[in-house]
Image (cartoon, rainbow, N blue to C red):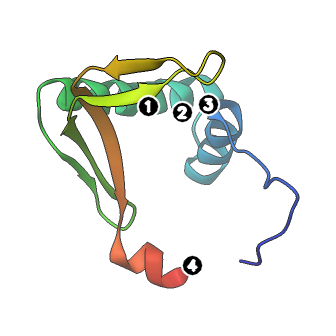
Amino acid sequence: MNKTSSKPETLGIPELTATMADAHDLTKARAKSILDSLRDEIVQSLLAGKRVNIFGLGTFEVRATKAKMGRNPKTGEKIEIPAGRKVVFKTAKGLKDQM
């Protein structure tokens, strides 16, 4: 993949639904239902503190963040950013090698 200044094409749920429906002889409604269920299951697993590994794609997990000092870009005022949690995605080695 070459790096260019233009943005790459974005695939959203409607495009994935259509592609999945064509590839697996499903209705678009059924394909969308499957994708929605997959998304919901990933979110519920992450909220429960579990890691989600999708073979060949990568791993989603929740990591804790430390409290830190930041700066308001408008005023320059220092503000404290509280500790929290964030979702991180680590790309699978096979996919990384293909890039």
Q: Secondary structure at mark 1?
A: helix
Q: Position of residue 27 (x, y in %)?
A: 61, 30
Q: Are marks 1 and 2 in contact (CB under 8 Å)?
A: yes
Q: Amino acid at mark 2?
A: Ala
Q: Secondary structure at mark 2?
A: helix
Tell me the residue that label 3 is attached to: 27
Q: Position of residue 13 (x, y in %)?
A: 62, 32
Tell me the residue that label 4 is attached to: 99
Q: Secondary structure at mark 3?
A: loop
Given this view, does label 3 or label 2 mark the residue nearer the observer?
2
What whole-number distance in Å separates the C-alpha atoms at marks 1 and 3?
11 Å
Q: Amino acid at mark 4?
A: Met
Q: Position of residue 71 (x, y in %)?
A: 49, 26
Q: Is residue 60 left or right of residue 25?
A: left
Q: Amino acid at mark 1?
A: Ile
> Residue at position x 20%, y 40% from top?
63
